[in-house]
Amino acid sequence: MQGTEKLQKQKKEFRLASAFTVTVGTNGEQGGDAGHGSRTYFRLDSDGADVGISLEASGTGVTIEMGGDSELRTFVEALEFAAQTLRSMADLS
């Protein structure tokens, strides 16, 4: 998506037996739909975790599947970090 390369982003690694790195960023609410300029970025990188990611052919959905207890725990931590960071960046207290 155009416009996300200019966003300020934060990145954090989560590691147990598996490892995820999540990178998130946003320029916050801009007063409407995508045409008004609001952009949000979320990237999840896996280092040795049992993860499968697929994008629907229509481009309307993403599926993330993983196996293992460590993957569950590190994924939850990564999502919590992402949510907290995006709330803070967008001032969505």
Image (spheres, grey):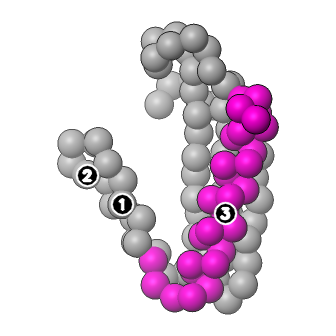
Q: Do the residues under discs 1 and 2 have CB atoms within 8 angstroms?
A: yes
| Mark closest to the chain's N terminus, 1 or 2 | 2
Residue 3 found in image quarter: top right
Task: Measuring from the top left, give residue 92's x and y in whole percent.
Answer: 71, 32
Q: Is residue 92 magenta?
A: yes
Q: CA distance from mark 1 to mark 2?
A: 8 Å
Residue drawn at 50 percent across, 13 percent down: 32
- Left or right of residue 80: residue 42: left
Residue drawn at 77 percent across, 59 percent down: 12
Judging by the rendered image, the residue that carries numbered circle 3 is: 78
Q: What is the secondary structure assignment of the residue under circle 3?
A: helix
Judging by the rendered image, the residue that carries numbered circle 2 is: 56
Judging by the rendered image, the residue that carries numbered circle 1 is: 63
Q: Is residue 84 magenta?
A: yes
Residue 7 sits above or below residue 56 on the image: above
Residue type indicated by callout 1: Thr
